[in-house]
Image (tube, rainbow, N blue to C red):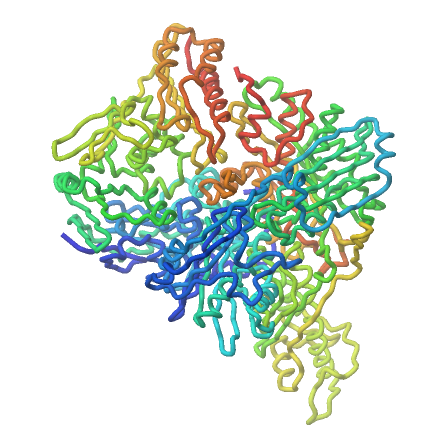
């Protein structure tokens, strides 16, 4: 079937492919119970904002099977946070969001633990909660400081603009909906040591948070992550919270303790993608060229800071999306509300920033009666010479090629004509079409996070074990690193195995996040390979040249030019001889030559000064564009995505099959954020959409019937490992093409409205925009 | 009479008695048998990660079900095949190979469920088209792939090489057990009578006893509200409950007939309903759930209810006193209140067939088109003679405490000219007969607007069929 571009499936299949399909892959709750193992369940707040006057656990402690009830007071340090330690692990005197963990019950069975939870009595004194950005601004409830990025002179540019539009733009939050809910088992060891198995994107943080919470030294805690059943950012910081709770239970009872949240609990407790409310003013000329943009971002951080400042900052960086801003004044603040602490989610603020300008471009197009694609093209960053509003040069920019390729592929003009014709004659349905872009900055915006280390061990049979700080959550980072290492040694990828991520082997690692898992850890692994290869190459040259006297050892210290030695097809080739890789490895061992290496990598060239709002926060950009057609039922507001075509610039992909899956999955997730995924809360602050019955992620029936993904060739990204580009987050932003197409469809029905359409555009929001008009 | 259940698991005979029969199938598989390939995510039949295949001695054909909401007690006489039972001697099944080759698995957590649903697709010998793939995967959620690679995997399997479960377990003969089961534990009693007579006697003896149809809703209550049923009766061994009869005038459906069989039975004779059932729930739910379960559940948003209402279906109740018929439209007395005595049970439902001149349309509006509880649903049926409407029936769900017929509107429509003006005018009267609430699925205002618009949509669609 050509629809899904079979030819893109090159590269080794996922390294866990067979164990996944056979049901053999082990996730946290698949680990067999140890004798004496205990289950942890959480007492959750039934208030959004209240002081706690009393926690009475006596009845729970009386229950058969209950081994303990612990509260915040039982921690050595009951606060944590990935940036600022402002969040209690277990709320002690104050609850700041509904379903906030207050106490843990640890019991011999899951059933007893949950029964125990019901018996813990908590008394509250209600405080006034804040649930909206508006109310938080009114009450001056902020988290952290204001950020500002300024370029040119916005006010002067407004006065010279032909037209100005002003308004507000809002986006909703999004539940990660990783299939495996937060889960962790803490195994106590001797001398208060702890071994933690966690479903976490950030084992190092789990190790540090657990140690801090229990007053242990970091060297007493090991965290191991084999894999996650999905992460999407939701297990970047918040897995540490759950791990610390399980660790407390294990530390107190000295028995293995398992904490596996139900899907409902997970959705109620953990933070989500940040809802934003933004005020904008945009000036543009009659040809569609944007002259000046002012945006004040307000991100709903929820009750605690978590990663909000970095997320807000990325939203501000991505407000240009793919378009050159000559004059811009971008400010941002995180507001504090009584919601779960919002956190990292694929795109990390980028989608919220890009949504603003993609929405504004649809508005400009409507205002000027100009095709939105023309507006986009006139504002698009040029191939070279562009500079972002935060001062980073945009070079080797393949977006113009991507646009051209996509426009040609879909025959845009005739497609647009078809839509015009359909809408002119149809009364009860309306279609829309839009092309949106992504230019996603790759690197953590905090420079120190852009480092990684990797351990590569070559065994005597020629097989290789690789350990890095990268965690596997389905995205295929292990498969990519496997590919990098196999290519480096010239061996088959089936002889390279990626090991579970462990703080024992790789410490001081960063979260597997910011799309950078393969970039950073792959580069570190490659560095380690280079060193081992150097040893083997020298060995080959010593054998070939008979350079070692009889009775003496071959060695890796001899100064030899190894530049001509190649590693290919299981062989090591010198100019005149070839050696089997396996054989040479064996010889190396008997000659006491090192066959293992631990290497460290740091991303070059990046820097950013938040005070000035200028710098080069990103090593490079991953680019792409998507065009989507939607059909809206004017009777119900329901939307169908008819067709989507995507073109990505992923540099020189390491594994096209893996990358294809990332693009397809990210698009679907982005589409969900833009359409059907909506968080619904009761007036009390309790999340009502806390399971797939009420929270609807896209199903197999919702993805575009006609869906094509292609990659354009780009060999210029030489700064990154193997000239590849990161792929995890950038295509998420392309889900916006569906939302922009909905907006375009609505514009067909109404000449006057330039009002911002809410994101997500649910059937109800769409029908509300269409008004009470009859369809006959 | 037995005090245990007996079934087969990946080809091996198993017996379970006592309290364990009240466990869910997924818990039994994961924590009793160590078969941890079957995953539990939502514990409510909405994500499909727990999908397993179940067959029995009657139908050689295996079907997918949600093991997270299937109670062990209901497994008597079945053969359960889990993800671990699909590969033999470590050799992956063709479907498993295709999933690997097409990168159909990313994080792997939903994967076993998808593989089992694809097994269902190949087991049903349906032609494997993209459309069928999607239909068989409606009950499975994946957050990683965007589904394209899974569809590719499904389409790339060579049907000749893909072994059926019958072939994989060709040596297995499943004993047919028709004897009654009674299992009593201190907290839980389970009855599975072998005749209708015994069933009604039991229900008379224990009027508070809950009839368990397939537990697609009860299972959710057990998982989510930690509800502990005290006494349950299961009618699977009562032959009368398996009635499925299609004749010229009506369709008779017994209490134990699964929705997927009903969907098939209606194919070709009432496509409007069989197509509607296609959007309803998921294959896993339809393979296990029953129409009578949907009726007895009495949710105001039950998706089959507007259809049954406008078709003037009859509910057949049974007790020790014999059978009693109630018109479907009079069956609901209020929110979850049925015209039914405590000792009565629903035996079957009789649905008249549509006459050729009747126009029927069914609607379901939800945030997501498939496998989503509706916000509003509706059924409208009409006849038009010489340009005038001479019969009209309309039922809405999700706009009141129960599925609602609109008697005032129905009366007004009769005698009107079939034209846009009349439909437009009357659509604005609907608001007087409905009382929608605001909840997690939609606001009252939205439901009002949709109810009005669907009425207009009916006019547009009916216009294509009315011969003026």
Q: Toward the viewer: B66 or A79?
A: A79
Q: Toward the viewer: A738 or B83?
A: A738
Could you tell me if residue B35 is visible in this image? no
Residue A381 horizontal/vertical position (percent): 79, 41
Q: Toward the viewer: A616 or A429?
A: A616
Left of B258 or right of it: where is A145?
right
Could you tell me if residue A420 is visible in this image? yes
Residue A228 horizontal/vertical position (percent): 53, 58
Left of A486 or right of it: where is A316?
right
Q: Toward the viewer: A747 or A352?
A: A352
Number of marks in picture: 0
Residue at left offset 25%, top offset 59%: B13
Where residue B415 sits, quadrant-wise, is top left
Residue at left offset 57%, top offset 36%: A675
Residue at left offset 58%, top offset 65%: A77
Taking A136 as reference, is B49 above or below it? below
Residue B362 horizontal/vertical position (percent): 40, 25
Where residue B337 sits, quadrant-wise, is top left
Classify the position of the N terminus of chain A by image quarter.
Answer: top right
Residue A191 horizontal/vertical position (percent): 51, 78
């Amino acid at each position: 079937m050509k629809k899904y571009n079979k030819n893109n499936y090159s590269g080794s299949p996922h390294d866990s492919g067979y164990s996944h399909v056979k049901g053999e892959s082990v996730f946290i709750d698949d680990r067999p119970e140890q004798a004496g193992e205990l289950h942890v369940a959480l007492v959750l707040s039934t208030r959004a904002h209240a002081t706690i006057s009393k926690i009475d656990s006596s009845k729970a402690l009386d229950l058969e099977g209950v081994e303990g009830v612990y509260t915040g007071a039982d921690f050595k340090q009951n606060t944590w946070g990935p940036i600022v330690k402002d969040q209690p692990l277990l709320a002690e005197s104050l609850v700041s969001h509904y379903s906030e963990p207050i106490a843990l019950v640890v019991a011999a069975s899951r059933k007893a633990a949950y029964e125990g939870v019901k018996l813990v009595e908590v008394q509250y004194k209600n405080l006034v909660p804040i649930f909206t950005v508006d109310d938080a601004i009114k009450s001056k409830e902020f988290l952290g400081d204001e950020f500002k990025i300024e370029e040119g002179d916005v006010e002067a540019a407004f006065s010279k603009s032909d037209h100005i539009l002003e308004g507000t733009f809002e986006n909703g939050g999004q539940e990660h909906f990783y299939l495996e809910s937060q889960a962790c088992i803490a195994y106590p060891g001797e001398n208060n040591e702890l071994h933690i198995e966690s479903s976490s994107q950030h084992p190092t943080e789990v190790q540090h948070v657990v140690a801090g919470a229990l007053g242990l030294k970091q060297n007493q805690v090991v965290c191991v992550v084999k894999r996650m059943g999905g992460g999407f950012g939701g297990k970047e910081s918040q897995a540490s919270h759950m791990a610390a709770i399980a660790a407390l239970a294990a530390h107190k009872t000295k028995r293995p303790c398992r904490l596996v949240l139900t899907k409902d609990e997970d959705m109620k407790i953990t933070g989500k993608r940040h809802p934003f409310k933004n005020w904008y003013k945009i000036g543009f000329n009659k040809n569609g060229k944007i002259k000046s943009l002012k945006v004040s971002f307000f991100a709903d951080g929820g009750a605690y800071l978590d990663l909000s400042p970095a997320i807000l900052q990325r939203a501000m960086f991505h407000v240009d999306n793919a378009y050159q801003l000559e004059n811009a004044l971008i400010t941002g603040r995180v507001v504090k509300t009584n919601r779960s602490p919002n956190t990292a989610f694929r795109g990390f603020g980028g989608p919220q920033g890009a949504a603003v300008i993609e929405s504004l471009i649809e508005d400009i197009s409507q205002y000027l009666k100009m095709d939105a694609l023309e507006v986009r093209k006139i504002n698009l960053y040029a191939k070279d010479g562009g500079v972002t509003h935060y001062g980073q040069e945009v070079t080797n920019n393949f977006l113009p090629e991507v646009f051209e390729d996509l426009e040609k592929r879909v025959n845009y003009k005739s497609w647009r004509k078809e839509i015009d014709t359909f809408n002119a004659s149809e009364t009860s349905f309306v279609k829309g079409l839009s092309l949106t872009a992504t230019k996603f900055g790759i690197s953590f915006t905090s420079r120190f996070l852009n480092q990684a280390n990797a351990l590569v061990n070559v065994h005597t049979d020629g097989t290789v074990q690789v350990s890095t700080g990268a965690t596997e959550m389905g995205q295929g980072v292990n498969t990519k690193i496997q590919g990098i290492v196999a290519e480096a040694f010239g061996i088959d990828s089936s002889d390279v195995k990626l090991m579970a991520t462990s703080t024992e082997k790789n410490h001081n690692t960063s979260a597997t996040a910011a799309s950078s898992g393969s970039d950073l850890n792959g580069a570190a692994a490659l560095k380690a390979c280079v060193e081992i290869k150097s040893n083997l190459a020298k060995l080959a040259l010593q054998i070939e040249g008979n350079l070692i006297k009889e009775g003496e050892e071959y060695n890796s210290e001899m100064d030899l030019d190894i530049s001509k030695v190649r590693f290919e097809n299981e062989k090591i080739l010198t100019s005149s001889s070839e050696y089997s890789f396996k054989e040479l490895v064996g010889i190396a061992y008997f000659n006491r030559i090192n066959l293992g290496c631990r290497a460290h990598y740091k991303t070059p060239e990046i820097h950013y000064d938040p005070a000035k709002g200028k710098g080069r926060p990103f090593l490079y950009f991953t680019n792409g564009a998507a065009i989507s057609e939607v059909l809206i039922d004017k009777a119900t507001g329901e939307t169908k995505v008819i067709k989507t075509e995507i073109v990505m610039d992923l540099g020189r992909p390491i594994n096209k099959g893996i990358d294809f899956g990332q693009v397809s999955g990210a698009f679907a997730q982005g589409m969900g954020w833009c359409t059907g995924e909506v968080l619904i809360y009761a007036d009390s602050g309790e999340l009502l959409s806390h399971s797939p019955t009420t929270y609807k992620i896209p199903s197999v029936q919702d993805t575009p019937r006609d869906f094509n993904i292609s990659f354009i060739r780009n060999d210029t990204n030489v700064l990154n490992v193997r000239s590849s580009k990161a792929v995890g987050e950038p295509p998420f932003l392309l889900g916006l093409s569906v939302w922009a197409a909905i907006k375009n469809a609505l514009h067909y029905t109404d000449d006057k409205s330039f009002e911002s359409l809410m994101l997500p555009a649910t059937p109800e929001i769409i029908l509300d925009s269409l008004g009470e008009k009859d369809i006959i | 009479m037995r005090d245990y259940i007996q079934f087969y698991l990946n080809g091996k005979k198993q017996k379970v008695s006592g309290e364990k029969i009240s466990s869910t199938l997924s818990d039994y598989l994961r924590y009793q048998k160590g078969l941890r390939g079957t995953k539990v995510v939502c514990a409510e039949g909405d994500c499909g990660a727990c999908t397993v295949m179940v067959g029995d001695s009657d139908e050689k054909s295996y079907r997918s079900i949600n093991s997270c909401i299937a109670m062990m007690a209901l497994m008597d006489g079945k053969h359960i095949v889990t993800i671990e039972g699909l590969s033999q001697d470590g050799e992956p099944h063709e479907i498993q190979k295709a999933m690997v080759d097409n990168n159909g698995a990313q994080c792997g957590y939903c994967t076993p469920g998808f593989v089992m649903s694809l097994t269902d697709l190949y087991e049903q010998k349906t032609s494997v088209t993209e459309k069928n793939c999607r239909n068989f995967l409606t009950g499975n959620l994946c957050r990683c792939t965007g589904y394209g690679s899974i569809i590719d995997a499904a389409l790339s399997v060579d049907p000749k090489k893909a072994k059926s479960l019958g072939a994989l377990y060709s040596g297995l003969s499943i004993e047919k057990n028709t004897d009654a089961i009674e299992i009593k534990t201190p907290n839980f009693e389970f009855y599975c009578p072998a005749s209708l007579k015994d069933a009604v006697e039991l229900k008379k003896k224990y009027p508070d006893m809950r009839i368990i149809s397939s537990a697609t809703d009860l299972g959710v209550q057990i998982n989510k509200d930690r509800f502990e049923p005290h006494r349950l009766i299961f009618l699977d061994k009562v032959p009368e409950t398996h009635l499925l009869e299609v004749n010229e005038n009506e369709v008779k459906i017994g209490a134990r007939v699964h929705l997927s069989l009903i969907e098939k039975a209606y194919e070709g004779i009432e496509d409007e309903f069989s197509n509607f059932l296609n959007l309803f729930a998921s294959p896993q739910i339809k393979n296990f759930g029953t129409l009578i379960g949907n009726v007895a559940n009495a949710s105001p948003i039950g998706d089959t209810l507007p259809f049954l209402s406008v078709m003037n279906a009859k509910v057949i109740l049974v007790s020790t006193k014999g059978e009693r018929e109630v018109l479907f439209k009079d069956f609901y007395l209020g929110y979850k209140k049925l015209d039914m005595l405590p000792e009565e049970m629903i035996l079957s439902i009789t649905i008249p067939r549509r006459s050729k001149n009747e126009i029927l349309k069914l609607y379901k509006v939800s945030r997501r088109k498939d496998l989503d509880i509706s916000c509003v649903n509706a059924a409208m049926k009409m006849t038009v003679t010489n340009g005038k409407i001479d019969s009209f029936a309309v039922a809405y769900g999700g706009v009141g405490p129960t599925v609602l017929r609109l008697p005032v509107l129905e009366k007004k429509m009769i005698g009107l000219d079939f034209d846009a003006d009349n439909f437009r005018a009357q659509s604005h009267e609907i608001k007087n007969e409905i009382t929608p609430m605001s909840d997690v699925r939609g606001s009252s205002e939205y439901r009002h607007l949709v109810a009005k618009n669907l009425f207009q949509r009916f006019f547009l669609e009916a216009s294509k069929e009315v011969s003026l």
